[in-house]
Image (cartoon, helix red, strand yellow):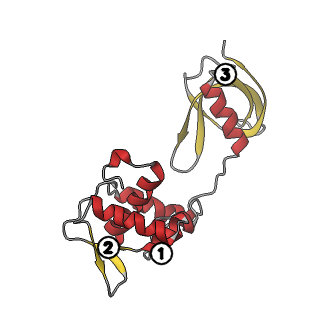
């Protein structure tokens, strides 16, 4: 059994990180938690817990009455970098429906509330077109919705990044039709495209 982090396969390391997540945030973990989160057998979950104890014996102690391992007084994470932002992001993602409850590492969701995030969906095919254009240094012709005109127009843009303003995603791009405009601008992709080409 590997006792060095560098000897571990990714799946095992992920389960050991999960053990630490539960110990740090909830103070306890048991075989059932691993079985539910990763779909592993009773034997595999026992092996993972024993492996973890072998690597960090001061981090958890078996509590017979709770039928679970509880956080030890000398707890010092080996795999997890405790991050309040990550914990709160999981809560928000569950609330917004971005993360399924079954995929969340938080065992017992604490009471919380959050203002709903405005829904501004991104069509996967449109995002793929933009990402490919960025990666291959291509320009794409899109139907662009200007704030100054009521009707969308076709325009060639050369995307170079995507950006998130806290509410919606934008494509950062050079406008090939109006080169006098600022070098980079946020574009409102109206959901249609019809061609791509090299930038030069």
The answer to which image quadrant residue 156 occupies is: top right
Dot 2 or dot 3: first in sequence order is: 2
Residue 64, horizontal then vertical, whole percent? 32, 84
Q: Quadrant of residue 100?
A: bottom right
Q: Earlier in the sequence, mark 2 or mark 1?
A: 2
Mark 3, other Cα within 10 Å: few <14 / some 14–19 / many ≥20:
some
The mark found on residue 27 in the picture is 2
Label ID, residue 18: none
- Residue 50 shows up from this direction: yes
- CB atoms of marks 2 and 1 within 8 Å: no
Badge 3 vs badge 1, beta-carbon distance below 8 Å: no
Q: On the rendered image, what quadrant is the N terminus found in?
A: bottom left
Few, some or many residues within 10 Å of mark 1 (<14, 14–19, 20+): some
- Numbered disc in front, either 3 or 1: 1
Q: Residues within 10 Å of mark 2 (few under 14, many from 20)?
A: some
Q: Is residue 71 above or below residue 173?
A: below
- Residue nearest the observer in this picture, 106 or 56: 56
Name, please, the residue furthest toward the left: 74
| Up-down relation of residue 180 to residue 5 (above or below) | above
Residue 14 position, x and y percent, is 44, 55
Q: Which residue bears the numbered disc 3?
A: 138
In the current view of this chain or complex, which residue is farthest to the top? 200
Q: What residue is at 46 percent from the left and 49 percent from the top?
A: 10
The answer to whether 60 is drawn above or below residue 117 in the figure is below
Residue 152 or 7: which is nearer the viewer?
7
Pair 2/3: label in front: 2
* Among the two numbered marks 3 and 1 on one chain, the one whose residue lies closer to the N terminus: 1
Q: Label 1: which residue?
A: 32
Task: Tell me if 98 is positioned left or right of 147 in this view.
Answer: left
Q: Measure how far apart labels 2 and 3 are at the Cα level.
A: 51 Å
Position of residue 175 in the picture relative to residue 72 (left or right): right
């Amino acid at each position: 059994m590997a006792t060095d982090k560098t000897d571990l396969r990714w799946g095992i390391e992920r389960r050991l990180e999960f053990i630490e997540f539960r110990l740090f945030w909830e103070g306890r973990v048991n075989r059932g938690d691993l079985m539910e989160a990763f779909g592993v057998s009773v034997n595999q979950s026992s092996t993972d817990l024993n492996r973890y104890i072998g690597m960090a014996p001061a981090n958890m102690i078996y509590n017979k009455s709770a039928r679970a391992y509880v956080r030890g007084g000398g707890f010092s994470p080996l795999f997890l970098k405790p991050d309040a932002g990550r914990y709160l992001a999981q809560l928000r993602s569950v609330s917004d429906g971005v993360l399924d409850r079954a995929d969340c590492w938080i065992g017992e969701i604490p009471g919380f509330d959050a203002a709903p995030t405005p829904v501004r969906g991104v069509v996967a095919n449109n995002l793929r077109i933009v990402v490919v254009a960025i990666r291959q240094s291509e320009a794409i012709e899109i139907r662009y919705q200007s704030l100054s005109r009521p009707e969308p127009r076709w325009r060639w843009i050369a995307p170079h990044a995507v950006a998130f303003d806290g509410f919606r995603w934008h494509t950062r791009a050079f406008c090939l039709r109006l080169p006098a405009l600022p070098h980079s601008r946020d574009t409102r992709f109206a959901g249609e495209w019809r061609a791509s080409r090299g930038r030069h």
